[in-house]
Amino acid sequence: MGLSSIGTANEEGVQLCIFDLRRGQREGQELDKILYFFPADLPLSSQLSVIGLSEGLITFTRIFSPDAACEVIEAERHSHVFYEAEPDIWMVMIVAKSKEAEAIWRIDALREVLKEIHSLFVMFHGCIRTLLDKEPGGGLTRAHLYPFVMDYLRDFLFGKKLQLPSFRDCLKERRTVQMLTVGREAAIEVQTLVRILESSAGNMPCFSLILFQDLLVSTTLSPEDTINMFTYAVLRLTPLALFSGAKSWSYLRKGNSSSHVSTGSTLFSTGSVLEQFYGSRDASPAGDNRYHVTRPLQHDKWFKGKDGFLVTDIWGGDIGSLNVTTPTVWLQQTEERMYLCAYQYKSLTLILLIPLSSILNGDQGVSIVKQQLLENASLKILKVEEKLSKGWGGENAYHVSGYRYLLVNGNRDISRASPPAKVTTLAKESLLALNKLREEVDAEKNRAKWDNPGREKDLEVCIRVKNNAWAIACITGGKELYMVLEKANETLLYASDAVEKFSNRYCNGAFSLD
Amino acid sequence: MSGKASSSQASIGGLGSGSVSHVFIQYPPLRCNIPGSRGFYYDDGNKLLLSPTSNQVFSWKTAPFSPNAAPNIDSITEGPICSIRFSLDEKLIAVQRSNTSIQFFHRETGETFTHRCKSESESILGFFWTDCPSCDIVVVKTSGLDLYAYDHALKSLALVETKKMTVSWYVYTHESRLVLLASGMQCKTFHGFQLSSVGIIRLPKFEMVMAKPEANSKPVLASEDVYIVTVYGRIYCLQVDRVAMVLHSYRFYRDAIIQQGSLPIYSHKVAVNSRAPISAPLPVLFRGFPRSDSFTSRPGTKESESLEASDSNDNEAIIYGDGWTFLVPDLICDIANKRLWKIHLDLEAISASSSEVPSVLEFLQRRKLEANKAKQLCLAITRTMILERRPINMVAKAMDVLVTSYALSLKTGSYFKGIKTERTPSSVPNVSGPGQGEDVNTGRTDGLGKSVQQESASRVNSVSVGRSSNYSSETEDSSSFEPLKISSNDAQFDSGKVDTGARSSATGNPLNASVSEQQESQLTSPAISPDEMYRFVFAPAEEEMIGEPSYLVSIILEFFRSANLEKVKVNPNLYVLTVQLLARSEQYAELGLFVINKIIEPSKEVALQLLESGRQNFQIRKLGSDMLRQVSLHQDYVLLLVQDGYYLEALRYARKHKVTTIRPSLFLEAAMTSNDSQHLAAVLRFFSDFIPGFHSTSDFSTYYHILNEMNSSSVVA
């Protein structure tokens, strides 16, 4: 097969492409399909051959499964992860299965990366298809996608190497929200604050999101919008994200972003291919060109202003004069564009989203809302921050000694896990075992989804690993619990007792069925 | 008076219009005209109005007040009378005959005995009965206090204790159980004792502030210028400084006396703005009327209409006169006309006159005499405030007031003692009428005309109200009396029994009026329970408010906050209402957080509502089913699982939690409809194993038959 030949061009690297099946169907126009390709300096012929293969596989599998074509192809040395982001718009990620043992992937985790890229893109730029319809040539779409995905991938850059979520991240769940647990009293204060915040814009229907550190405290957005906004906030807005170089304990920001700029340029080098492709024939790919492209994921572009509001010149304007254009995002729930106002006080980040349509005089109107917000909510913000800080147990707050766990509430897209620092203490063997177990569970879940749509499958697996650890997965009523118990007793009874205890203590007994 | 008052009336919405005076006296008065009367005495310990003749004592009960009360008549021997007081059990009458002797009469047996000063150098200034455990009567002499116990057997007084000190004069009120003893050249050095049922507390010696008119003259403080005031169980002292024309106030604590603030006085400036002939200022309203809060800033009297109409034949038409003496707590003795008037607070008028709704509520919540009326007013005001969509922070304050008051009433037990009142459909009587123009504008703190409060048993008729002049403060701002106002969060006005814990001030123990009296008057309480809040405020508000329920949710949230602070349990129905409101406006994210963070506390009602509201939203439904399990409603949870098709999980759960009340056929039917013969067999097997005799039931045979058919058909296929 031609799979291996593709790999040779980028032996240990990652390839990521976005293409449109509806384009370039005529011979000689194949290049039209390509909307994005990483690495961009790969010869176009190689790019086309990757996309051609993917397209072939999709077409072939559609014969058997028209609604859901292929999800993954496992070749000898590569895994191809497929994701149909929008009808006929596909994202494919190809990762090498290196002999170097670190390159062991969980396919669903990789697919979540693709989903994340796409939904963030949609939040800022709208659907890809809409962009394509706007300018059928594809230049506009490419000019948006290229810098966006590049900025996104920079977060995975370590040195010169992209580090995608591997088996070491098996106790993490992308595309979920991590929440701060608050007491009733604080929760009431928070909800009161939410109401004050949203009343700052008068009678306009707005939405808000409140984060403490990198954890969600409150949201009035739909689940999907919440995930996107939360992800963006953690990536770029929270205090830890703002002060780049600060150590982060959220898996969303892995690398040390300050190193990105210098090292990134070598990997994301520009070339003739890019000029031709990503819209700029006479300038750098991401710079100013014939398209006005905002780069919301650009690093080190957000600052905290004197008034506590976060400002950026990403959307235009001059940061020095503080005369900047207010950022906007697109919400799936309301299908409407919203102004994004972010305010920060100590560890508290408040995001207020106001519909564009409800503010007539643009930035001026926004600044009135901001003023109103300060007047109405300042005291309450102080109070809430104080309450939350008091109750905050630090980055190891959700550590449960003896357990390394991941708890996912699929019903609410919430997850909670052992702190990363604690997970690193696990033996590689244990992590590999759990990663394997999760792959199996993923497969089981997917099968159940097809067999019996709308039904939740209950599942419980305990595996004794070679190093005498237990790898456990429990699924019930849409909630999932994964854990690794090292240095544990050898009996199965012990393992299930441990689950029962954990479940009763931390999950309201959701997993204690027997 | 007016701009402010009238505008705020309108804003309260529908509460009494046009009435601007806050106080009225109700016709008819108690007529106490006794031939041969030698004046009036007020026994504040027993709340008796006494009128002695040469050989008899007429006594009227003034609490509860009735204009038709008939006097009791007791015989005493003839002789001079300095003061009269009945013992607290009303068995003895003590008559001070001179400054050396007090005579006692036993009311039933008629026995008498006389108590005399032993030494020639001292003289009796007065006496009072006490409910202090160690003694029964306290005699105040120029040389100090003598505490005596009454010996029933010997019919005499036995000396219990003597407190030696020089005393120039003293003031005492039974309400405060506090006696203040003045001494020193200027009579401004005070010793104080509180003799209550819990014992005797000696207050630290303190000095009152006196301005000097000139370098060498030293004014002497007179007893007429010092008043003990009890406001909501807290004890204050007011002192008139005639030189500086300032009214000083002091607050008493167990271990300190703290000066609270001063007000300027403008002598002889009682502002009588009335146009109507029959009206009068109530100069003593503030002090003679302990429960009137300082924010009722413009006291005045209002005549009832009937008064004007009916009294033409005698001179009752002249209501106010020099002969008016104000008695604690709410009586006016008209000495000239021998009448006793009861003062009423016009709650509606007061409520209507202030736009500061939280303060009005705070005031109403303290009403103990007309508790039911106050309560109904509070409910109406709160409801109106919500319907008018007043600013949330104002409603929040109102919620704080109501919840704090309820929590307090729970603590003191008064809420349950109170008679449960039924809802009156419209508790908003219109108090406007012909009398409304007859309002009187007097300063708020005016006129400390001579009151009998501090020496209640002294000769009332010897006191000239006019002479001591009426003082009127013209300060407009009610906040000037802030020091006397009680913050609602402060638990100090709780009875003395409750340890008030740490206070920000250095003084730890506020001195309170005696416990017994407080409880006496707490028979009913205007406190509003969370249940009543739901039924009479939130539920009606929800019905009447149309459109966006977001405002109401904000208000309910504020109520939760207040309730949480006071650890008051919220009615589950209010949680149900909250779920409905949030679901109706499709604020599912918020609803989820409300449930997850337990702002909405789990209960069966809430769980069922979540399931109901979750028809449109899967996440919410999930929260409902989780809550069922959480509150251990096992049967409901199992039924829900079966209903949703999770019959195997349901069986597992039923087995674990020993739910045996659900018919096996439900599970069997669910298994059958899933068309999975293995599952049906498993369910059948389950019941065969765990229910004895299941084999012989019709369920078994029916489904066994079905199972066989399923199997045979699948074999054929």
Image (tube, rainbow, N blue to C red):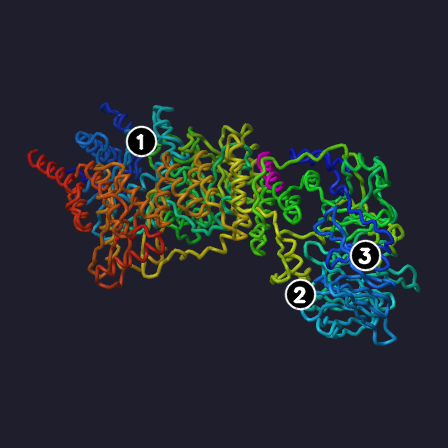
Find out whether residue B178 is within the magenta segment.
Answer: no
Q: Residue at x 80, y 73 (%)?
A: B165
Pick whichever, A91 or B185, lies toward us: B185
Q: Chain of mark 1?
A: A
Residue that badge 2 annotates: B197
**Mark 3 and mark 2: Cα distance apart in space:** 25 Å
Please report the bounds of the magenta region as a residue range.
B377-389
Q: Chain of mark 2?
A: B
Pick whichever, B250 or B41, lies toward us: B41
Secondary structure, mark 3, is strand
Secondary structure, mark 2, is loop
Amino acid type at mark 1: Glu
Image x and y of residue B107, in percent: 75, 63
> Which picture quadrant has residue B260?
bottom right
Q: Main secondary structure of the magenta part?
A: helix
Q: Nearer the viewer, mark 1 or mark 2?
A: 2
